[in-house]
Amino acid sequence: MNLSYWEYKTWLSNIDYTIIGSGIVGLNCALQLKKRFPKAKVLVLENGILPQGASTKNAGFACFGSISEIIADHKTHSQEEVFQLVKKRWEGLQILRNNLGDEAIDYQNNGGHEVFVDSQEELYHQSIEKIDSINSLLKPIFNQEAFKKSRNIFNFKNIQDQYITSVLEAQIDTGKMMDALLQKVLKSGANLLNSITVESYIEQENSCTVKTNAFEFKTKKILVATNGFASQLIEENVKPARAQILITKPIKNLAIKGTFHLEEGYYYYYYFRNINDRILFGGGRNLDFKTEETTKFGETAIVQNELERILKTVILPDTHFDVEHRWSGIMGMGTQKRPILKQVSNNVYCGVRLGGLGVAIGSLIGKELADLV
């Protein structure tokens, strides 16, 4: 790129902090850096025209974990670790709401419901039995019971008799959230450049030289907030995980309202919600985990066909629908659900591996990433 003197002087000289990635984490990191260091020059670089990975691609679940997910987490985490995972998700959601306001993100507390299909009878009864103990564990976070049993008021078919309802779970408008966050970051005085791919960096004693697809420049500190793409720049235990989603055309008299977790929910298998008289439905990584462990956007027939089948047989069994749009996002996963938040080297920091819960914890991780500096 043939840059002028003015372009270098204005955007690429005397950079104090360079944030790689303009998703929820990167933008919240920029806000916190400008709050801590108002005179600092903060530059955010984004590979896509819009935030590329999952922040503008997600389903808009303001969730902190379904009951079967929390049960599963107890198998690989201690009870205190499970408590802290949920606590951080809840704290992150409150930061998001306080930063942007409920109206700006179209926050709606319609409740979340875990739905168990007929073949999940054992998991269903196990989850029902655990409601009281999990409510007791999490009550210090919420000051109320988070889960209860509900009847099948939405007339889904081929499922167990009851849902387990998360009374505090909500939904947001992902596009409105990211637009509000972008506007707030620009007003803070941070600079944002899109369609810039960071290819590598070389660290010196007190600075780094950053090489992109368009130019090179120096910065005092680098903060990596690329989540599922993190391993392209730093050596951390983060695996990309593609999530495929579809959305229907508007459905007349759609009665379904809320967020729903199906077959172990948002982290594992399927999730759906209402939005503007439509059903948004995603998941299906379990059908082909290896193929979905990719940084390439796109859809596959095996996943999309299964999403449509479940819509027809479980969610909308007596309702005609047409699919209007399909897309995918890239999450960051690992063997543990705890995010990686650390100083990588003298001048490089990272906040990555959000485990599919970026809406819940992204604001908190971005703030904590900035506070590492």
Image (cartoon, rainbow, N blue to C red):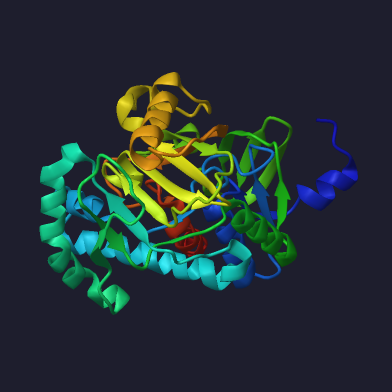
- Observer-nearest of 225 and 107: 107
Q: Name above or below for residue 209 compared with residue 36.
A: above
- Observer-nearest of 97 and 316: 316
Q: Quadrant of residue 141?
A: bottom left
Residue shown at the point (68%, 30%) measured from the top left: 213
Residue shown at the point (10%, 59%) measured from the top left: 129
Q: Name above or below for residue 312 compared with residue 183.
A: above
Would residue 31 be seen by someone viewing this image from the given angle?
A: yes
Q: Residue furthest bottom?
A: 143
Q: Horizontally, is 69 left or right of 205 in the view?
A: left
Q: Residue furthest top?
A: 301
Give the x, y percent position of residue 108: 50, 65
Q: Quadrant of residue 67?
A: bottom left
Would residue 347 be seen by someone viewing this image from the given angle?
A: no
Give the x, y percent position of residue 138: 23, 70
- Observer-nearest of 30 and 139: 139
Give the x, y percent position of residue 177: 60, 58
What is the count of numbered marks? 0
Residue shown at the point (45%, 50%) measured from the top left: 273
Q: Name above or below for residue 30 compared with residue 282.
A: below
For the N terminus, the image quarter is top right
Q: Horizontally, is 368 left or right of 10 in the view?
A: left
Give the x, y percent position of residue 283: 39, 37
